[in-house]
DNA sequence: GGCTCCTCCTTGAACTTTAAACAAATGGTC
DNA sequence: GACCATTTGTTTAAAGTTCAAGGAGGAGCC
């Protein structure tokens, strides 16, 4: 994974060749990375199961409903929603199609731009959210916040914000500053 | 998401009813949680794409090869591997089937237990790992370690280990203590 | 208008994951 | 041995995700 046996000698650094000596992870870094991946995997699974059971949808879909619920008039342009949720438009298209079938979201044409579509949270969708939100918060609390000190919570936020910013496509939302 | 408008009054705490007043997230907690989810989503996507492009497999599959590479005789029982990778046996079955098609893993019967199967990393599989590991470490470094102070790295490890432990099924690996 | 390029969103196929059901082997227990 | 519960791993179908391709509208330019 992050470590494999390293070759005996390394090419001169700074040369034109790309394949420098790989910057393998140290043991400490490796432990961090494994804890991270394990924690994320288990947490993701846990919340997906919780929501699938209690709300009949995966975590990502739940997140979409939340974004819509928070938006003015409970609606967002598809691209906007995709960016907020950090997923591709393609994935969003499929997701909204499913949520539409459930009656939790409906599509509306955009008057200004005939290419555009709004995803609109229906009253039924809002109800689902209201009924399932308490259980979900509780799950998140039990899995994460209840186990961490305030200082750890703060650190986690800072750390993951840094990571997220580093991966944010440079221009993402540059023209939609109010989304950030 | 973690917050919806709260009812005006709460049922008496400690009563027999479950639906207490939900423990909504504070604003700070909510920011932490969103940073976390966004970071994880972006990171997961990023590494998946990196490995799909450079190694022809998703991140999880890569992780399976790594576990096998580290195991004695480069082999593990299916259940053992599933537990190490924190995935279900079903998922593992499918994954190994695919990796077997690639020629990177092969199955072997377990002599002791006729139900049992070993997943064995082939030489081809090992080569793929050797060739793609440098690129992957580099991606992990650039996305995570290069951006964090040593103190933050340490915190991240501690925090995610706590989260992981909380979600580990109580008995998981209890009878396989050498796996922990 | 005509041209080109870009953006918005959808689609279909291939692939991965999940959930539930299942066969076979094991390990008691009687 | 017969019985029953458990463990092991697979299978099926449905659901979700990804990738590449594409239609349609907008925006700038001649």
Image (cartoon, coloured by chain):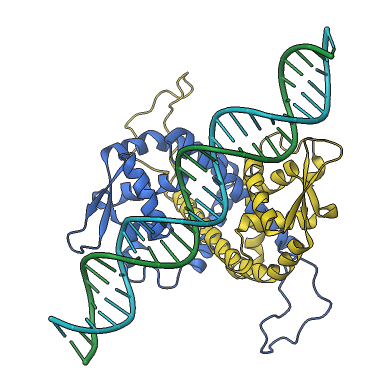
Chain colours: A yellow, B blue, C green, D cyan
Residue at the image point whose x is 67% and y is 52% from the top: B35
Horizontal and vertical percent position of residue A74: 81, 55
Residue A52 quadrant: bottom right
Q: Is residue B57 visible?
A: yes
Figure disc tally: 0
Say which of B150 and B156 sits in front: B156
Q: Quadrant of the N terminus of chain A?
A: top left
Residue A21 quadrant: top left
Q: Is residue B158 visible?
A: no
Residue at the image point whose x is 65% and y is 71% from the top: A135
Say which of A31 and A122 sits in front: A122
Residue at the image point whose x is 77% and y is 66% from the top: B4
Q: Is residue B59 above or below residue B5?
A: above
Horizontal and vertical percent position of residue B142: 55, 38
Residue at the image point whose x is 51% and y is 54% from the top: A36
Horizontal and vertical percent position of residue B90: 40, 58
Residue B102 quadrant: top left
Q: Is residue B15 above or below residue A149?
A: below
Q: Is residue D18 left or right of residue A101?
A: left
Say which of C23 and B41 sits in front: C23
Say which of A71 and B65 sits in front: A71
Horizontal and vertical percent position of residue D5: 33, 80
Q: Quadrant of the C terminus of chain A?
A: top right
């Amino acid at each position: 994974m992050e470590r494999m046996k390293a070759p005996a000698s390394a090419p001169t650094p700074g040369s034109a060749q790309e394949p420098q000596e790989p910057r393998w992870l140290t043991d400490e870094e490796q432990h961090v990375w494994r804890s991270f991946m394990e924690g994320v995997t288990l947490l993701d699974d846990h919340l997906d199961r919780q929501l699938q059971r209690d709300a009949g949808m995966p975590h990502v879909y739940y997140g979409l409903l939340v974004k819509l619920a928070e938006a003015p008039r409970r609606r967002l342009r598809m691209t906007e929603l995709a960016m907020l949720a950090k997923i591709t438009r393609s994935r969003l298209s499929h997701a909204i199609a499913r949520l539409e079938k459930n009656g939790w979201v409906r599509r509306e044409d955009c008057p200004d731009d005939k290419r555009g579509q709004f995803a609109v949270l229906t009253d039924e969708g809002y109800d689902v959210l209201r009924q399932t939100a308490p259980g979900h918060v509780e799950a998140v609390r039990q899995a994460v916040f209840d186990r961490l000190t305030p200082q750890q919570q703060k650190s986690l936020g800072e750390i993951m914000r840094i990571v997220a910013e580093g991966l944010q496509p440079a221009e993402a939302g540059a023209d939609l500053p109010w989304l950030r």
